């Protein structure tokens, strides 16, 4: 039985194989992930997972020791979707990093609660595979290991930050659609502040009807399509900058 006194990550422990009914870590992770997607991360508890599996709560403790183990399993299950399948890995460093970045964002957007809820997750095998793929993407650049890790970290930071911003923007858009009165009150307050003359840059931007140059309004993007276009522009600019800064041909 797994015990809370063992500080090793769950990946270092063998899966139980004799108890009946037998549940796998993949099954436990799938149930936890389904609950979080449907009801939010706070709904993921040992009791709830056990109920969904049709097991007693104490039975679940035979397979996982703590909530931290559950978090680790969920994190690893999500990262499984980030990995580029065999045979689909692009050849050039830029195409490869672009593919990894796009796939990572798609997965994070599919599980919007994960960006803010899994920060304390223990690294598992799929996290290591993600790092391995990122290093493989930059293997032909001629850069040393430290520089390649820097590229990976920089792209990961951008993707995570963009996903967090996108999730927040879409949440605000949903709130606005559900409560138009709330939007009207916020707009009225904002206009009052602009009319007071305290925000000349914002007044020029929104009052003048400026645009981004791509036929998009100056207002922050609030749709998945607009947010995706913003992501693509930002990713291209980031990779342009890394290529110049690190002298990658």
Image (tube, helix red, strand yellow):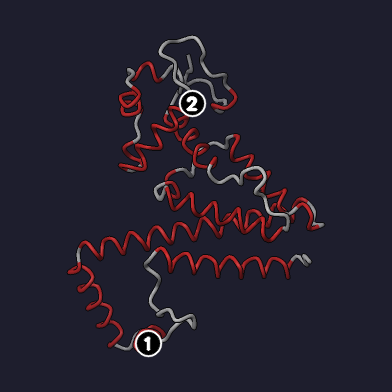
Q: Nearer the viewer, residue 88 or 140?
A: 88
Q: Nearer the viewer, residue 143 or 141?
A: 141
Which of the 4 image quadrants contains residue 122?
A: top right
Q: Is residue 62 left or right of residue 57?
A: right
Q: Residues within 10 Å of mark 1 (few under 14, many from 20)?
A: few
Q: Nearer the viewer, residue 44 or 201?
A: 44
Q: Is residue 17 left or right of residue 48?
A: right
The residue lying furthest to the left in this view is: 181
Instruction: State which quarter of the image contains the C terminus.
Output: bottom right
* Residue 91 location (% of width, % of height): 73, 55
Question: Is disc 2 in contact with disc 1, using a CB cutoff of under 8 Å?
Answer: no
Q: Nearer the viewer, residue 78 or 149?
A: 78
Q: Residue at x 38, y 16 (%)?
A: 59
The residue lying furthest to the front in this view is: 87
* Residue 113 location (% of width, % of height): 39, 48
Dot 2 or dot 1: first in sequence order is 2
User: Dot 1 lies on which element?
Assistant: loop
Q: Is residue 237 left or right of residue 221?
A: right
Which of the 4 image quadrants contains residue 166?
A: bottom left
Q: Which mark is residue 25?
A: 2
* Residue 38 location (% of width, % of height): 32, 42
Q: Residues within 10 Å of mark 2 (few under 14, many from 20)?
A: some
Residue denoted by label 1: 209
Position of 77 relative to 65 (above/below): below
Position of 62 relative to 116 (above/below): above
User: Dot 2 lies on which element?
Assistant: helix
Which of the 4 image quadrants contains residue 101?
A: bottom right
Position of 71 relative to 177 (above/below): above
Q: Is residue 168 left or right of residue 77?
A: left
């Amino acid at each position: 039985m797994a015990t809370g006194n063992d500080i090793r990550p769950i990946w270092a422990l063998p899966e139980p194989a004799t108890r009946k009914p037998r549940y796998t870590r993949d099954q436990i992770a799938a149930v936890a992930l389904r609950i979080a997607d449907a009801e939010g991360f706070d709904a993921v508890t040992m009791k709830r997972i056990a109920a969904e599996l049709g097991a007693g709560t104490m039975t679940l403790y035979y397979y996982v020791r703590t909530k931290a183990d559950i978090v680790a399993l969920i994190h690893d299950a999500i990262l499984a979707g980030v990995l580029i399948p065999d045979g689909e890995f692009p050849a050039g460093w830029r195409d490869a990093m672009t593919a990894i970045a796009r796939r990572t964002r798609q997965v994070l957007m599919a599980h919007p609660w994960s960006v803010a809820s899994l920060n304390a997750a223990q690294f598992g095998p799929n996290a290591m595979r993600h790092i391995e793929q990122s290093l493989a993407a930059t293997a032909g650049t001629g850069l040393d290991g430290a520089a390649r890790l820097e590229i990976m970290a920089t792209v990961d930071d951008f993707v995570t930050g963009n996903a967090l911003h996108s999730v927040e923007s879409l949440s605000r858009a949903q709130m606005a659609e559900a409560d138009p009165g709330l939007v009207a009150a916020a707009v009225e307050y904002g206009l009052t502040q602009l009319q007071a003359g305290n925000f000349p840059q914002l007044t020029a931007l929104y009052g003048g009807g400026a645009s981004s140059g791509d036929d998009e309004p100056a207002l922050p993007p609030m749709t998945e399509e607009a947010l995706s276009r913003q992501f693509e522009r930002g990713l291209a600019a980031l990779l342009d900058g890394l290529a110049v800064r690190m002298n990658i041909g």
